[in-house]
């Protein structure tokens, strides 16, 4: 799926059906509950998150919970919150037993396993960021960074978990690597609908607003990078 065309284009959409089956469909309810109960404010009153870092050894086909769960972003990739270690609430590893989460992890790993730019890397770090953007009629919710940027990681999956009917915005923007002009506006709307990005585009998410009452946008950001490029292991 993440073929030469994807590498060059810099982004791709993966439909829900790729991850969701009759067997794991009921567990989406359990996954959504995690967003209601396990996330904590991350510096903004209108954004909550929790995090789990994993280590994947390609040759041994082994996944482990990372010993050091600190999260670091360069200031290059995030001028607002980058350049410092951010400690988020760590998710309990039982989330990996939720069938839909297990399937997301397995499917992503099999795509990453076949992804040629990372072929020579044996030790890879996976970040699973559970993020809720929460807005009301009087206050929008922003992502951090809030405009066009590139992430530190060479490959990032954005999985939509839940989007309120009352939500406004929360659209994904894709921009040209050279001109930084927006070329595509995408909206993830279905359960587990997924956007994959590499570093051949810039990207952003538009602020989330609400038509009425409280609106949510729940996503899992699934990042992958060679462990040696992690500046703070
Ligand atoms: Fe990003």
Image (tube, rainbow, N blue to C red):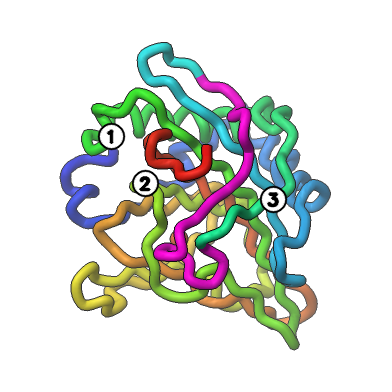
Q: Are marks 3 and 1 in contact (CB under 8 Å)?
A: no
SS for dot 1: helix
Instruction: Please tell me which residue lies in front, 127 or 16.
Output: 127
The answer to whether the beta carbon of the residue marked 2 is less than 8 Å from any atom of ligand 1 is: no
In the image, residue 8 lies in the stretch drawn in magenta: no
Query: What residue would you read off at disc 1?
Result: 118
In the rendered structure, which disc, 1 or 2, sits on the residue that comes first in sequence?
Answer: 1
- Residue found at x 23% / y 68%: 177
Q: Are marks 1 and 2 in contact (CB under 8 Å)?
A: yes
Query: What residue would you read off at disc 3?
Result: 88
Q: Which residues are magenta?
A: 63-82
Q: Magenta residues: mostly which secondary structure? A: loop
Quarter of the picture holding the N terminus: top left
- Residue found at x 60% / y 34%: 101
Task: Specify the farthest residue to the right.
Answer: 37
Instruction: Please tell me which residue lies in front, 226 or 141.
Output: 226
Query: What residue would you read off at disc 2?
Result: 155
Q: Quadrant of residue 2?
A: top left
Question: Which percent across, then down, holds residue 180?
Answer: 27, 76
């Amino acid at each position: 799926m993440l073929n030469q065309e994807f590498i060059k284009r810099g982004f791709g959409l993966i439909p829900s059906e790729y991850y969701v089956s009759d067997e794991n469909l009921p567990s989406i309810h359990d996954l959504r509950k995690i967003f209601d109960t396990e996330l904590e404010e991350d510096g903004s009153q209108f954004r909550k998150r929790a995090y789990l870092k994993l280590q994947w050894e390609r040759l041994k086909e082994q996944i482990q919970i990372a010993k050091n769960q600190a999260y670091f972003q360069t200031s290059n990739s995030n001028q607002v919150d980058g350049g410092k270690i951010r400690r988020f609430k760590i998710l309990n590893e039982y989330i990996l037993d939720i069938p839909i989460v297990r399937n997301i992890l397995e499917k992503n790993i099999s795509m990453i396993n076949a992804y040629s730019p990372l072929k020579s890397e044996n030790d890879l770090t996976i970040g699973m960021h559970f993020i809720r953007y929460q807005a009301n009629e009087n206050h929008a919710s922003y992502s951090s960074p809030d405009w066009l940027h590139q992430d530190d990681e060479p490959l990032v999956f954005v999985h939509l978990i839940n989007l309120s009917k009352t939500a406004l915005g929360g659209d994904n923007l894709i921009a040209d690597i050279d001109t930084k002009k927006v070329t595509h506006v995408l909206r993830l709307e279905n359960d587990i609908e997924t956007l994959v990005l590499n570093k051949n585009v810039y990207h952003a998410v538009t602020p989330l607003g609400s038509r009425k009452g409280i609106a949510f946008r729940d996503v899992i950001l699934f990042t992958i990078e060679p462990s040696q490029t992690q500046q703070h292991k």
